[in-house]
Amino acid sequence: MSQTDDAVQAASARLVVRTVAVDETEPLIPRADPRHPLVWMRRGEGIVGLGEVVRIETTGATRVEDAAAAWTSLAELAEIDDRVGLPGTGLVAFGAFAFADESEAMSVLIVPELVMGRRDGRAWVTRISLDTGDDEATDASGSAEVALPEPAPKRQVPRVAFTPGSLPPVAYEAAVAEAVRRIDAGELEDAGELEEAGRLEKVVLARQLVGELHEDAGLRATINRLAEDYPDTWVFAVDGLIGASPETLVRVDHGTVSARVLAGTASRGAGEASDRERALALAASEKDRAEHALAVESAVQRLAPHTARLDTSPEPFTLQLPNLWHLATDLKGTLGDGSSSLDLVQAVHPTAAVAGTPRSIALPAIAELEGFDRGRYAGPVGWIDGDGDGEWAIALRCAQVDPDGTVTAYAGCGIVHDSVPADELAETVMKFRPIVEAFGG
């Protein structure tokens, strides 16, 4: 599907943007809209948006490309006065994109009316408005006197009772077994990109948990719990998609590009000695290192054409989260072709860490074996600014909260030739834990 009429109309809007520094020490998440939160935080720093000035919606195989084009047009027309000059200041949009080309889920870029931010010990407020041609209104939008919403009082997290979704545990184990069979049989692709030609080596299979949100308190307490329990992750909320992702898809900042690839997982130990043993075992695991290498190779292959230089961690390192260990590799480089962050999102999504290898075989296998629409799960989520810089994570450890109160949580595992179905099911239970606990489970 090509760029939608709504996206074209949104791209023609003329925005007036003013960012000013403020003295602010209160946490940002309690100021978020409880019904429609827009949040991007890590270690207490990031941005929170309120209201909606422009909404760009796209679908289909060109959803990221269409959004990037609309965003470029919108940014070129905008009048921007940024008096702070940090990542997240000036014109910004929060975004969340569907995982699959065929998904029925809408992909969105949302430009808020008000953005509150904090980074490197500095705080700011950005006001964004449509240029109506009223000089007095335009002047008012740039006023340094900004009335911030008061932080909401701390509340109990809303409670959601989750039950298995369309792929219950027994069916999930059967899907894993079938994936292993296909990998061991050397399933070939019928057609695809030449650089991806080959046999199926890895496929990532996910399952769902589904519940109902009945509380009237909104989602701030849930998001705040994720931020408190998982401070080293990207805690996000965009158009009902909320979560705490440890995986950086891509970050672009003034010509530099970085990413963090995660693949390979182990549970935390009960005590210090046990925990250390599990981390060492993960680092030495041939299965997990092979799975990780496929994910790193995929990321490098897709980022390298856009960079003048791209370096990776010499060896995978173990990343400690409160509930599990991951094998991780950091990538950092210098852009060589002026790509925006959304251009790079288009280039790298979906990664082998959430799809498989080769992608042209793994994606049809996912659609067949999972049997449900992932929506925005494992898709790109993050923000972009007027220069095209931004931070994007992979939407993991997350749930989609629909307007009718349905909450759908997702977790998946990378399946390779020696995967054991019961072990992979247990891994999904670990990965569900952040979002289940954030909803009072």
Image: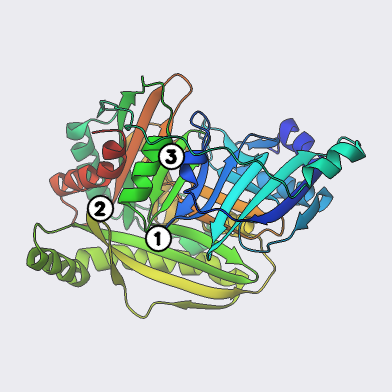
- Tell me the crowding category of disc 3: few under 14, some 14 to 19, or many 20 or more residues within 10 angstroms, Cα based: many
The x and y percentages for residue 404 are 45, 18
In the picture of the structure, the residue carrying the numbered disc 3 is 242
In the picture of the structure, the residue carrying the numbered disc 2 is 185
- Tell me the crowding category of disc 1: few under 14, some 14 to 19, or many 20 or more residues within 10 angstroms, Cα based: some
| First along the sequence among labels 3 and 1 | 1
Q: Is residue 397 visible?
A: no
Residue in the image at 46% along x and 35% along y: 152
Mark 1 to mark 2 CA distance (whole Å): 13 Å
Quick one: SS at disc 2? Answer: loop
Dividing the picture into quarters, in which one does residue 255 lie? Answer: bottom right
Which amino acid, mark 3? Ile
Q: Is residue 244 visible?
A: yes
| First along the sequence among labels 1 and 2 | 2
Q: Mark 2 and mark 1 in contact (Cβ < 8 Å)? A: no
Quick one: SS at disc 3? Answer: strand
Disc number at residue 263? none
In this rendering, would 380 be left or right of 137?
left
Visual colour scheme: rainbow
- Camera-side residue: 115 or 249? 115
Quick one: SS at disc 1? Answer: loop
In the picture of the structure, the residue carrying the numbered disc 1 is 198
